[in-house]
Image (cartoon, grey):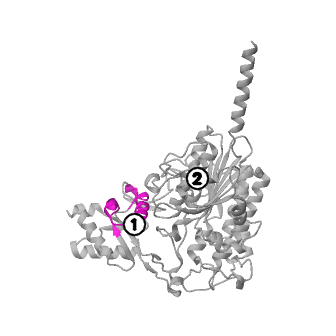
Amino acid sequence: MKKTISFIIAFIITLSSFTQDLQRPKLVVGIVIDQMRWDYLYRYYDRYATNGGFKRLLSQGFSCENTMIPYTPSLTACGHTSIYTGSVPAITGITDNIWWDKEQNRSVYCTEDNSVKSIGSTDAAGQMSPRNLLVTTICDELRLATNFRSKVIGIALKDRGAILPAGHSADAAYWYDNATGDWITSSYYMKELPKWVKNFNEQKLVDKYFQQGWNTLYPANTYVQSDEQNKPYTSKPLGAAFPYDLKKFTGKNYDIIDVTPYGNTLTVEFAKAAIVYGELGVDDYTDFLTISFSSPDYIGHTFGPNSIEEEDNYLRLDKELGDLLDFLDTKVGKDQYTLFLAADHGVSHVPGFLKEHNIPTGNFDMTAAANAMNNFMNSKYGISNIVVGSFNYYQFTLNYQAIDSAKLNADEIKKDLIGYLLKQPGVAKAFAPDKLLEIPLNARIKDMFINGYYPKRCGDIQVILDPQWLPGFSNGGTTHGMWNPYDAHIPLLWYGWGIKQGKLNRETYMTDIAPTVAALLHIQMPSGCIGKVIPEVMK
């Protein structure tokens, strides 16, 4: 009897030790900064606040200094998806923000879903869901691991920045309705907005931000990392230069908030409300909050990486991140949450700026190229609609119905068009993606294009432009999307529970984030994961 009792006591002690050893944070916070080049961590480092976000994460957390995107195109939907799935477009099916779907024979937006209804809006802005995503995210795996007792919420101004990270089984994803200035969702998640979201919307914070206007945080002449204002090659949706009067947009142009730092402020305030009223990090089950800051992308596209607007945006974002970290320390508990910060892609300098400084650059107008290709085909074969569009970045899709009706050979058509493209200024390579293995191309770059190729949602002819060459812009500005380091080298910072302090210089990848989180939480990797755990990050 005594032996039995001793055995039971020993078993209970062993079991207790095991459960104590299997610890998890109360909350995981995933932050994606839409369009943050890695060098922004250090370009503005001297001006970041000591108690702000970036210096705190760098000094008290862990930085993976050489984190790369392992695929093309380096775009918003693909990047958010890759971070949270540990996978690539060739597997996730999210090949672009918008793609030409060969099965449906039409243009498809990455999160569109006409089977659901807008919740919190009367327009179509809420007809969105993650159904186009073919795999699970790390948030889905957390939900599965806890039998759906863990809570997951996704937040971003952009619908795709909220929906794709949160995954299929999220409790909620919320995004911004540019028509009304409200946070909304879809019937995929719920039948009506929670009361706390309605109360938040009733504050009309955007109108209050408009009243403040946007001026530089510090005197404009101290922004030594930036170019002078009012350059002809930048867009000017707010006016010519600082200070920007935003009062004229009050009550009507709610989309303008996207291209100001107040978009970040709005996102942080909504995230705080989601933590409190969504009751995240309050029980024994790890919750997950995904936050994407969309405004840096709008500001970067509009003004470019060397603008005062971009520098001011990041100095303000640093303060917003510091405020968010303070809030998490108070509400969830210091060292009770794990946080990572990454970006979905980088960005190129504005071509006009590069030209001023004698750096090779140029614009390649995809729409004009598609029209010219059709004219070329018409002169040779008498058919003018062979190229149906350039809906995927740097790709052209063929009209196979027209080709078959004319009894033409598709391979010969591709060969002719590729030959035409290779003669155009700025085109470094042109090839059929399904023949990629046969193309003489740098192995690293070739792997990136293979990782981005999902045949049903990709074009038939791929173009690689010369470095610093971009698609054409009629109103100035810049973009991203290619394999080059300015688009593909991103920050990756870790902080909080389970994280070491330090820095890693070996190459890591965007796809390594999800499996590392899985290892920290002792849960399964997402279903399409090809990334590897970064062991140096973890205590």
Q: As shown in the figure, which amino acid type bears the numbered disc 1?
A: Asn
Residue segment shown in magenta: 430-458
Query: Is residue 184 among the parts visible in the rendering?
Result: yes
Residue 260 higher or lower than 270, as above or below: below
- The dot on residue 534 is 2
Query: In the figure, residue 370 lies in which quadrant?
Result: bottom left
Residue 314 higher or lower than 351, as above or below: above
Query: In the figure, residue 339 lies in which quadrant?
Result: bottom right
Residue 131 at what x, y percent from top left? Answer: 50, 50
Residue 267 at what x, y percent from top left? Answer: 68, 62
State the SS at label 1: loop
Q: As drawn, is 63 to the left or to the right of 134?
A: right
State the SS at label 2: loop
Q: Nearer the viewer, residue 134 or 351?
A: 351
Query: In the figure, residue 61 lies in which quadrant?
Result: bottom right
Q: As drawn, is 383 to the left or to the right of 135?
A: left
Query: Is residue 62 among the parts visible in the rendering?
Result: no
- Rendered-image quadrant of the N terminus: top right
Q: Using a 10 Å C-alpha cutoff, classify the residue at mark 2 as few (fewer than 14 neighbours), some (14 to 19) or many (20 or more).
A: some
- The dot on residue 442 is 1
Q: How many marks can you see?
A: 2
Residue at the (73%, 67%) spot, across then down:
319
Q: As shown in the figure, which amino acid type bears the numbered disc 2?
A: Ile
Residue at the (29%, 68%) spot, across then down:
386
Residue at the (22%, 62%) spot, across then down:
405
Q: Residue 319 magenta-drawn?
A: no
